[in-house]
Amino acid sequence: MARTLTVEWSDAAALAAAGRAMAGIDFLRAMRDGRLPRPPIAQLLGFNLVEVEPGRAVFECLPREQHYNPIGMVHGGLAMTLLDSAMGCCVHTRMPAGGTYTTLEAKTNLVRAMTDKTGRVRAIGKLVHLGKRIATAEGRLEDDAGKLYAHATTTCMVLTEGS
């Protein structure tokens, strides 16, 4: 039986422009609070930024059938995307207005499969180090009971305006 999923999103360029004009933590809090729209990837995959503090960001997602791979479980890419988002955003909380970063490397360990019966999962990103040019962060993907589904680390390059 065919299924349908309709996705709507706001102008990504306008969201990025708003972000460049704000300190990172203020930008993320505006998205969390609904004063700015969620980015297209969050709309497409169905995840939300729910907590933002300096050096910390948390996303939530309810794994669904549309996230399945061909063997009948949630594709590992959902866990990786949630963790990449949480770790990147925990770095972003420390960026000044106009400051940016990019992921240089990310490593994810998938330790437990998810299905549409898993329930809500939370990707928790924590900043480990923020230097002038390099930032590192770690993340955990857990269910509401604290059961671990994946963990990850990332290295980001901190960019200055015009880099």
Image (cartoon, rainbow, N blue to C red):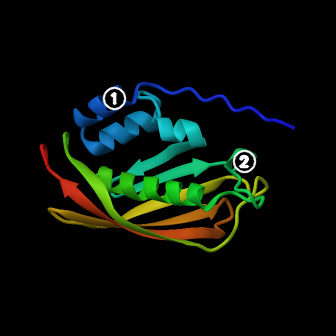
> In this rendering, is residue 28 above or below 138?
above
The picture places residue 80, in percent across and down from the top left corner, at 52, 60
Extreme residue toward the right, this view: 1
User: Along the horizontal axis of the image, is 76 left or right of 154?
Assistant: right
* Residue 34 numbered tag: none
Q: Describe the element under mark 2 as helix, strand or loop.
A: loop
Say which quarter of the image contains residue 69: bottom right
Neighbor class of circle 1 (other Cα within 10 Å; few <14, some 14-19, many 20+) is: few
- Residue sitting at x 74%, y 32%: 4
Q: Which residue is mark 1?
A: 13
Report, in whole angstroms, how far the alpha carbon at label 1 lies from the one at label 2: 28 Å
2 above or below 151?
A: above
Using the image as rendered, state which of residue 123 and residue 100 is in the foreground: 100
Residue 76 in sight: yes
Q: Residue under label 2, please give it.
A: 64
| First in residue order: circle 1 vs circle 2 | 1
In this rendering, position of residue 11 left or right of residue 3:
left
Amino acid marked by disc 2: Arg
Residue 13 as seen in the image, left or right of residue 33? left
Residue pictured at 31% horizontal, 44% vertical: 25
Q: Nearer the viewer, residue 26 or 76?
A: 76
Q: Quadrant of the N terminus?
A: top right
Q: Where is residue 84, by image quadrant?
A: bottom left
Q: Locate residue 118, reporting x and y percent.
A: 74, 58
Residue 14 in the image: above or below residue 108: above
- Mark 2 surroundings within 10 Å by alpha-carbon count, few (fewer than 14), some (14 through 19), many (20 or more): some
| Residue 105 place in picture, x, y as percent | 35, 66
What's under tag 1, amino acid-wise?
Ala
Could you tell me which residue is drawn at 69 percent across and 57 percent down? 74
In this picture, is 99 found above or below 54? above
